[in-house]
C-alpha cells in the first residue's frame, strides 16, 4: 500500500491517527435534529453549491434491506468535521450536505477552488508535505520565493480556463526483493491545484464513505483499522479472506471512475480538471506516454479518487453482511465459518472482474487464523495462532535501517548515532507496540550489539560485540545512560501506567 501506498511505516500511520474516528449517526432522530438546526438557513434560499433535496440515490447511499451485522456500517457519516475547510464549506453548504442537494449532485464548485484563500491554504498544505520538484524543476523553496505571484497566476488561469496540468515525472522507488514501485511527481503548481480541489470535494464523498474504510481519510488511520480487525477476531470471526488488488492504482478504469465522480458532481469545469489529471502525460527518462487507466501514486488527489472507485465494493460487501476492513487497496474479510469465507471470496472475485480490476494471485488467500500457517498479514502485522506479531517484511525493513545507521565504519560519536536511531525506534515502537512475543527483546539486543561493535572499532579492536567482556564493559545500563531508546523499557513503563 500510501506510499508510498503499500509500505506502511509508523510515521505514516501516526499521521492518519492524529484525529479520532468520525462518530456514526445511527438514528433518524439524530438526522432530524441536524435538519432542524439548518432549516432557518435553508428557508432563506438555495445553498451554495446546489439546492436542497432530501432523497439520496441508491448508488452511493443506504440500502433498503441490510443484514443485521451490516446495518451500523451503512449509516451516513456525520461526525467530527474539524478537518473541513470552513472558509469553503459555509454553514449553508454543510446544511445541504446533511439534507441532500437537487439531483444528488453538486454544482458551482469551481469558484471555490480558485479563491485566493483556498489556494493559499492548499499551498501551505503542499509546503508542509515538502516533496521533490516535478518535471519543470521548480522546488518548494523556489515556489516559496515567489508564492504570492505564483498563486495569483494560478487563480487567474483557473478562473479564465487557461490552466493546463503539466506532465508527471515518474521515478522508481526500491522495494524488497529487488522490485520497484512507480511514483508520480506532479509539479508544485499542480499539487497545489489538486489540494485545492480536494479541499472542496472531499466532504461530499466523505459523507458517503462507510466506516469500514480507513485508508487516507481524515480522522482515520491504520490503528483504527487494526482495532476493528481485533474486535472481529475476538467475536470469533477467524476465517479470513486476505486480499490485495494487483497494481490497483495503475489499473483503475478512467471511464468508470469518472462516472462515479459524476454521480455527485455536475460542475463541468471541475470535472474537466479531474479528467485532465487522469490523462496527464507521464515522463520517465526519455520515455513519454499518456495513461489509459489508473491514477498516479504520489498525486495529492489520487487517494481520494481511489476510495471513490472502491466505495461501491464497500457498500456491496456490507449489504451482504460481511465484516470487511479496508485500508486503501488492502483489505480483509473476517467470517465466522470457512464456508462464509469461501463465499465472500467469490463475491469479491465477481465484483472485481465486473469493475475492471484484478486480485493479486500471490497475495489473496483464505485461512483460519487460529491455526499455524493459516494466518494473515494486514498493515504490517501478522495475525496467526491467536497472536499478533510483526510481519517478517516489516521486521526486516527495520533491521536493514538499523544496519545502515550502525555501520562499524561510521566515524560519528555514540551520542550522534543514538540521536539518529532514537526517532526511528520510537516511531516504529509507537506503531508496533501491540505486537506479542519477544520481538522487542530481540531488536534491543541487536541494536546494542551493533553499538558495541562500533565502540570496539573505534578502539581499533574490530569485532562483532558479542563476547562476554564487551557486555561487561558496555552493559545495557551504559546505553540507557547514553540515552538509547529501548522498546522493552518503553513497554514496561506503558504497562505500569495502566
Image: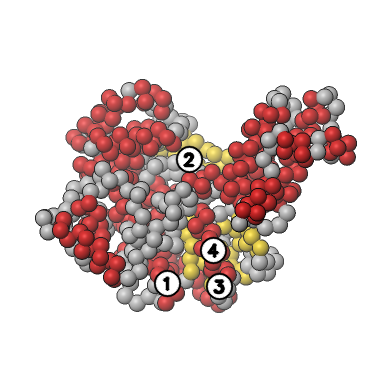
Give whichever of discs 4 and 1 has the lower sequence position.
Answer: 1
Q: Is residue 495 left or right of residue 192?
A: right
Residue holding disc 1: 70
Where is residue 12 shown, x and y percent of the image?
A: 51, 45
Where is residue 81 shown, x and y percent of the image?
A: 34, 52
Residue at 26% across, 60% down: 98
- The one of 55 and 474 positioned closer to us in this rendering: 474
**Disc 4 and disc 3 in contact, CB within 8 angstroms:** no
Q: Specify the farthest residue to the front.
A: 497
Give whichever of discs 4 and 3 has the lower sequence position.
Answer: 4
Where is residue 298 shown, x and y percent of the image?
A: 44, 41
Seen in the picture, residue 89 relative to 168 is either above or below; the reply is: below
* Local SS, label 4: helix
* Local SS, label 1: helix
Seen in the picture, residue 89 relative to 214 is either above or below; the reply is: above
Residue 464 in view in this figure: no
Residue holding disc 2: 183
- Mark 4 and mark 1: span between their CA atoms? 15 Å
- Mark 4 and mark 3: span between their CA atoms? 10 Å
- Mark 3 and mark 2: span between their CA atoms? 39 Å
**Disc 3 and disc 1 in contact, CB within 8 angstroms:** no
Residue holding disc 4: 229
Q: Is residue 114 left or right of residue 79?
A: left
Q: Would you call the spot at circle 1 few (<14 residues within 10 Å), some (14-19), or many (20 or more)?
A: some
Residue at 33% across, 60% down: 78
Which numbered disc, 3 or 1, marks the residue closer to the eye? 3
- Mark 3 and mark 1: span between their CA atoms? 15 Å
Where is residue 79 shown, x and y percent of the image?
A: 35, 58
Give whichever of discs 4 and 2 has the lower sequence position.
Answer: 2
Residue holding disc 3: 235
Give whichever of discs 1 and 2 has the lower sequence position.
Answer: 1
- Mark 1 and mark 2: span between their CA atoms? 36 Å
Amino acid at each position: 500500500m500510501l506510499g508510498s501506498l503499500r509500505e506502511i511505516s509508523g510515521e505514516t500511520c501516526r499521521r492518519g491517527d492524529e484525529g479520532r474516528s468520525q462518530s456514526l449517526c445511527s438514528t433518524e432522530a439524530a438526522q432530524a435534529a441536524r435538519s432542524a438546526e439548518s432549516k432557518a438557513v435553508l428557508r432563506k434560499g438555495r445553498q451554495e453549491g446546489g439546492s436542497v433535496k432530501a432523497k439520496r440515490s441508491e448508488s452511493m447511499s443506504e440500502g433498503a434491506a441490510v443484514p443485521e451485522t451490516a446495518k451500523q456500517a451503512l449509516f451516513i457519516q456525520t461526525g467530527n468535521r474539524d478537518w473541513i475547510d470552513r472558509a469553503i464549506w459555509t454553514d449553508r453548504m454543510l446544511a445541504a450536505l446533511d439534507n441532500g442537494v437537487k439531483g444528488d449532485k453538486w454544482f458551482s464548485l469551481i469558484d471555490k477552488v480558485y479563491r485566493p484563500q483556498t489556494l493559499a491554504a492548499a499551498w501551505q498544505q503542499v509546503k508542509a508535505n515538502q516533496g521533490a520538484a516535478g518535471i519543470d524543476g521548480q522546488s518548494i523553496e523556489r515556489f516559496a520565493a515567489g508564492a504570492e505571484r505564483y498563486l495569483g497566476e494560478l487563480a487567474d488561469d483557473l478562473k479564465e480556463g487557461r490552466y493546463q496540468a503539466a506532465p508527471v515525472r515518474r521515478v522508481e522507488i526500491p522495494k524488497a526483493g529487488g522490485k520497484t514501485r512507480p511514483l508520480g511527481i506532479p509539479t508544485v503548481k499542480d499539487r497545489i491545484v489538486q489540494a485545492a480541489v480536494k479541499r472542496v470535494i472531499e466532504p461530499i464523498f466523505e459523507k458517503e464513505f462507510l466506516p469500514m474504510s480507513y485508508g487516507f481519510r481524515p480522522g482515520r488511520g491504520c490503528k483504527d483499522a487494526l482495532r476493528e480487525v481485533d474486535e472481529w477476531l475476538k467475536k470469533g470471526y477467524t476465517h479470513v479472506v486476505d486480499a490485495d488488488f494487483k497494481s490497483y492504482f495503475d489499473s483503475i478504469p478512467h471511464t468508470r471512475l469518472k462516472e462515479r465522480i459524476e454521480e455527485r458532481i455536475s460542475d463541468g469545469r471541475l470535472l474537466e480538471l479531474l479528467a485532465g489529471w487522469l490523462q496527464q502525460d507521464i515522463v520517465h527518462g526519455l520515455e513519454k506516454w499518456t495513461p489509459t487507466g489508473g491514477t498516479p501514486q504520489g498525486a495529492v488527489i489520487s487517494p481520494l479518487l481511489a476510495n471513490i472507485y472502491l466505495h461501491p465494493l464497500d457498500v456491496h460487501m456490507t449489504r451482504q453482511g460481511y465484516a470487511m476492513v479496508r485500508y486503501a487497496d488492502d483489505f480483509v474479510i473476517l467470517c465466522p465459518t470457512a464456508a462464509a469465507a469461501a463465499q465472500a471470496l467469490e463475491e469479491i472475485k465477481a465484483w472485481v472482474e465486473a469493475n475492471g480490476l484484478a486480485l493479486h494471485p500471490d497475495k489473496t488467500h483464505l485461512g483460519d487464523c487460529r491455526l499455524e500457517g493459516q494466518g494473515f498479514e494486514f498493515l504490517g502485522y501478522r495475525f496467526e495462532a491467536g497472536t499478533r506479531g510483526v510481519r517478517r517484511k516489516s521486521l526486516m525493513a527495520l533491521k536493514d535501517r538499523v544496519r545502515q545507521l550502525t555501520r562499524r565504519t561510521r566515524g560519528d560519536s555514540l551520542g550522534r548515532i543514538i540521536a539518529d536511531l532514537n526517532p526511528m525506534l520510537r516511531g516504529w515502537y509507537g506503531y508496533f507496540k501491540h505486537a506479542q512475543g519477544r520481538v522487542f527483546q530481540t531488536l534491543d539486543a541487536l541494536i546494542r550489539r551493533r553499538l558495541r561493535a562500533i565502540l570496539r572499532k573505534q578502539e581499533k579492536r574490530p569485532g562483532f560485540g558479542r563476547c562476554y567482556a564487551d557486555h561487561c564493559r558496555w552493559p545495557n545500563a551504559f546505553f540507557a545512560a547514553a540515552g538509547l531508546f529501548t522498546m522493552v523499557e518503553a513497554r514496561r513503563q506503558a504497562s505500569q501506567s495502566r
